[in-house]
Image: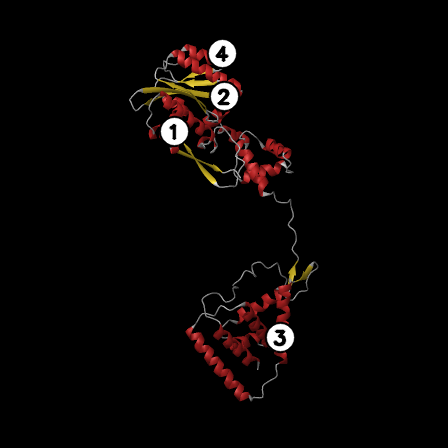
Amino acid sequence: MNQRIVASWALHTAKQMPVVCGNPIRPRNGLHESMDKYVSPHSQPPAGTVRAVPHRMFYFLLAHFFSCLLDLIPRANRSDHQKDLEILLLRQQLLILQRHHPKPPHISRWEKLGLAILAAKLTGLGRGAKTKLNQVLLLFKPDTVLKWHRDRVRRKWTFRQQRAGGRPATCPELQVLLLRLAQENPTWGYSKLHGELLKLGYDIGRSTVRDILKRQHIAPAPQRAKNCGNWSSLLSHYGKQLMACDFFTVETVWLKTLHALFFIELGSRRVHFAGCTAHPTAEWVTQQARHLTWRLQDEQLSMRFLIRDRDAKFTAKFDAVFVAEGIEILRTPYRTPTANAFAERWVRSVREECLDKLLIVNEAHLHRVLREYVRYFNQARPHQGIEQRCPIRIERGRRHGAVERRDVLGGIIHDYDRAAA
């Protein structure tokens, strides 16, 4: 009777499930990988263990219910000869199926449950269990079915999860902040970084600071300090105290040459347009220097250095105006426009964005155009050198509303802003 049940179950499973390649004892989901530690099926559960989680308890009860149901199945009123013929017929069909599909099918967990219970019942009838299983199991090896039964027993008991020892893990936010401090301050050692984090309210030990930096392959302070010096960091210290000036020429529609004088703050990239003229005499240039120093005093801007080239229009009187205000004159070498790169770069911007798209009529026209462009450049034009900020920082509180366009210089340049609510 048990042999017929096993054969019927195996044939029904082979017909219902598609035959695919793969290891039949390997589960298709991640339940086996996420299981806790298990004990031997023949040992008693040690102290500190608990019953399995609810879905495992349901699985355990279902297996026992199915096992009891098999014990209660009445024997059919058929002769032994009829039963033997039926078993032979089923075995022959399984052999034909196995010949066409030599690899065992990849069955589900619930199908494994039925085969494991039937195999356990058959092995409990007497001796020679391995021989009986070899005779009746055609789709799978007996060792495979027995392994399924052992896995079912292992799920019966599970250890309670023990909390891992040691200190709690450092939060990712704190690690990112520590790496930022180490990169921005190459001369700070472990103790300095530790003290800075304590000042910011983070409870962390000095050894933890050291371990985090070592895991990220950040060298100690003496090694990091060797490569910290560069022109960018050096000039950034004096950027707010440096100013540059220069002339550039514009040809009018009547081919008249006009000279424009401007000053630019290297730290903020703010431009001060001094004026334009067809005859830049020494007196006119000196007077523009006085106007600039008065404006710096009104806005309380402290400048220490002025970079200029060796143009003859910059006379000693021009230098004396700035020296009287405590500003030192730095003259560039001969024929080296790159030494005054900030000023030269602004000349390129004003030409590409403004002057190359217009025909300048006269001096008054040029003065009005440059005034309007400088106002746009300082207040509304993002600059890549200062992280896409404007030279004059204006807080734009509106974050909602329609986006409106403002035409600069009659539509030569477009500026965008939010409409007032």
Residue hosting label 2:
241
In depth, the one of 36 and 197 nearer the eye is 197
Regarding mark 4 in the picture, which secondary structure is present there?
loop
Distance, label 1 to label 4, CA atoms, is 32 Å
Instruction: Return the residue found at the far right.
Output: 47
Specify the label residue 67 is tagged with. Answer: 3
Query: Eyeballing the image, is 414 above or below 279?
Result: below
Residue 243 position, x and y percent, is: 46, 21
Q: Mark 2 or mark 4, which is nearer to you?
A: 4
Whichever of labels 2 and 4 marks the residue nearer the N terminus, that label is 2
- Point out the tag, 2 or 1, that comes first from the N-terminus: 2
- The amino acid type found where label 2 is placed reads Gln
Residue 130 in view here: yes
Which amino acid lies under the numbered mark 4 shown in the image of this protein? Answer: Ala
The Cα atoms of the two marked residues, 2 and 4, are separated by 16 Å
Image location of residue 357, percent across then percent down: 34, 30
Report the residue marked by disc 1.
Answer: 349
Position of residue 384 relative to residue 288, above or below, is: below
